[in-house]
Image (spheres, rainbow, N blue to C red):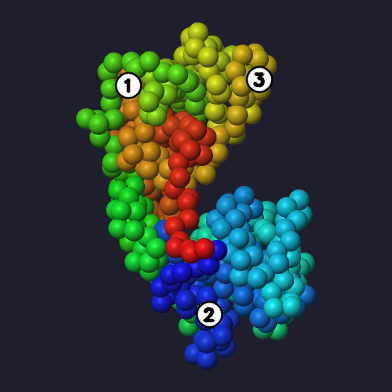
Amino acid sequence: MTISKLSKKQRLTMKWWCSPEYRELDAIICDGAVRSGKTLSMSLGFVFWAGSTFSGGAFALCGKTVTSLRRNVVTPMLPMLKELGCVCTEKVSRNYIDISFSGRTNRFYLFGGKDEGSAALIQGMTLSGVFFDEVALMPRSFVEQALARCSVAGSKMWFNCNPDNPSHWFYNEWIKKADEKRALYLHFTMDDNPSLSKNLKRRYERLYSGSFYERFVLGKWTASQGVIYPMFDREKHVFSEIPTCERFIISCDYGTVNPSSFGLWGLCNGVWYRLKEYYYSSKKEGASRTDEEHYAALEELAENRKIERVIVDPSAASFIECIRRHARFRVVKADNDVVTGIRHVCTALRQNKLMFHESCTDILREFGLYSWNEKTGTDAPIKENDHAMDDMRYFVMDTIVPHNNEDFIAFSVSR
């Protein structure tokens, strides 16, 4: 498998390190739209640079998680490297790959930088180079610890990301200071990937709206503002007649002082319907409920349906234990990545994969109130009117995200 079509920016991304104009620089930064071809060309360039410059060196490939790094970088890259003559030996259990190229062998360690504690994973290493996939999703402490490990003479740093909030530390410390950091900065649009068809470009334009459209389609660093789900439309997304569903799942945002919100979801013809909901506010009702009382409400919501699983706010340890103790439902902890979850809910709404029964008045009310907090300088919702929004987000991240194909690779190859 060989690459048959590259844009000018993709070629530069792969070869900048051997260009007389740029080879003395210390880093390269590529940002811009999704599916613009920056990740694959950059990862191949990183390996070629390492194999042409070092032998026996240690390098780091970093993603938000090792799983996402394998999906986005390693899986599409290794077959191409092998057909180009590289010998790749992967040790999955130990999270490294040995790659031999032109008689030289180097080791590439895989790291996930998902939280502040991740910096400890890379501490103490000596690296000849580091590659960050989606650096804007990683904590600053992890990135700076990895950069501090690049102490070998001739080491270089490679960054790619989609845009985020303009107050983001990486935008201000690296992109705006690229010259000061001795970094080549390249901004990508979808037009920089010649293998992306017009139909696919239109598809991505339809998937996003608001700040996500400006970031992922237009490639702009822009602040989130206004209502979070402007694509929600009562005419399109609200139904009155209950469909016949083949699967059922319940999602729960649990609160003691704050409201609790549970949603019953049913699948029919590829669409998930919110059939019923339970919403209890102790402030409004004037009395708190115990875990057992909330569990009784969960049983009432489920009725005699076969519930595949109950997805619960991961911080609700006592309620999770209560559900497990009753042994009727399988309970799983929700993925609470807020901004990623919001983005996937946006996509599901735009694709009409979510519908809401007219009786679900609390989630319908929250759709009109759930807004970005414009005072924080970061992407964060206002922590009000968000409980049904949270249980919906937990559901989408658990159930819909694994079945969409948003993360496919669009790149032209020939055999």
The answer to whether residue 120 shows anywhere in this view is no
Secondary structure under tag 2 reads helix
Q: Residue at x 28, y 41 (%)?
A: 231
- View extreme (top): residue: 304
Pick whichever, 314 or 43, lies toward us.
43
Between discs 2 and 3, the one toward the N terminus: 2
Instruction: Give the residue type at disc 1.
Output: His
Q: Tell me the number on the disc at residue 357.
A: 1
Q: Residue at x 27, y 18 (%)?
A: 240
| Quadrant in the rendering for residue 58 | bottom right
Q: Is residue 5 left or right of residue 360?
A: right
Q: CA distance from mark 1 to mark 2?
A: 55 Å
Report the amino acid beneath label 3: Arg
Measured Cα–Cα span from mark 2 to mark 3: 55 Å
Q: Position of residue 388 (x, y in %)?
A: 41, 29
Res 378 seen here: yes
Residue 313 in the image, given as x and y percentages of width and height: 55, 32
Q: Residues within 10 Å of mark 2 (few under 14, many from 20)?
A: some
The circle drawn on residue 80 is: none
Q: Quadrant of the N terminus?
A: bottom right
User: As drawn, which residue projects farthest toward the front?
Assistant: 415
Which of disc 2 and disc 1 is earlier in sequence? 2
Secondary element at image label 3: helix
Mark 1 surroundings: few (<14), some (14-19) or many (≥20) residues within 10 A: some
Residue beneath label 2, please? Answer: 15
Q: Quadrant of residue 233?
A: top left
Residue 108 place in picture, x, y as percent:
70, 65
Q: Residue at x 56, y 15 (%)?
A: 295
127 left or right of 209 in image:
right
Residue 324 shows which numbered tag? Answer: 3
Q: Decide which of tag 1 and tag 3 comes sooner along the chain.
A: 3
